[in-house]
Amino acid sequence: MLLRRPLIAGGVAEYRIARTAEVEIREILAWSEEKFGALGRRRYTALIVAAMQDIAGDPDQALVERKRLSRVEVGIYRIADSRDRVPDPPGLVREPRHALVFRMAPDGVLDIIGIIHDRMLLTRALRKIVRSNPDDR
């Protein structure tokens, strides 16, 4: 099941975060806090939120990479592409290493179904994300 997260940032775009993606994000943020402190966690959180807002506002933008896995097409958006839209504070993340994986639902809402690290094997990671997020609407 996906959780609805409305956007307020100047538009009516909406996105939902799959439970599996939410767990992954929590783990990434906990790691970030462990390595870079509370401020590092706030910075990465702000960057992830900015990236979600950016792709929800324009999921067809040129910065989105598209991949087709059997009958499912997903978009991949590198959160680094949203760095200039994070306010200071909390400030800049120097080397963000993650990308959001998403698909458009039939109801027009963007479903964020996963987050991947740039060192992951892309196709394998995407297959795992798609398998753990069946489109059951």
Image (cartoon, grey):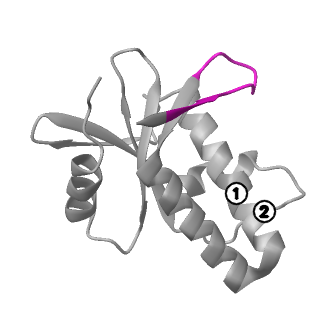
Q: Is residue 108 above or below residue 39?
A: above
Q: Position of residue 66 (x, y in %)?
A: 29, 41
- Residue 25 in the figure: left or right of residue 90: left
In reply to whether residue 12 is colored magenta, the answer given is: yes
Q: Position of residue 122 (x, y in %)?
A: 27, 62
Q: Can you say which quadrant of the picture contains the C terminus? A: top left
Q: Which contiguous range is marked in magenta? A: 3-13
Along the line of sight, the residue nearer the viewer: 35 or 79:
35
Q: Residue at x 45, y 35 (%)?
A: 2
Along the line of sight, the residue nearer the viewer: 10 or 37:
37
Question: In 3D space, how far apart are the residues under numbered discs 2 and 1 (Cα atoms)?
Answer: 5 Å
Q: Are marks 2 and 1 in contact (CB under 8 Å)?
A: yes
In the picture, the disc for residue 42 is 2
Q: Can you say which quadrant of the picture contains the N terminus? A: top left
Q: Is residue 104 visible?
A: yes
Q: Is residue 133 above or below residue 26?
A: above
Q: Residue at x 73, y 68 (%)?
A: 41
Q: Which residue is mark 1?
A: 45
What secondary structure is the stretch in magenta mostly built from?
loop
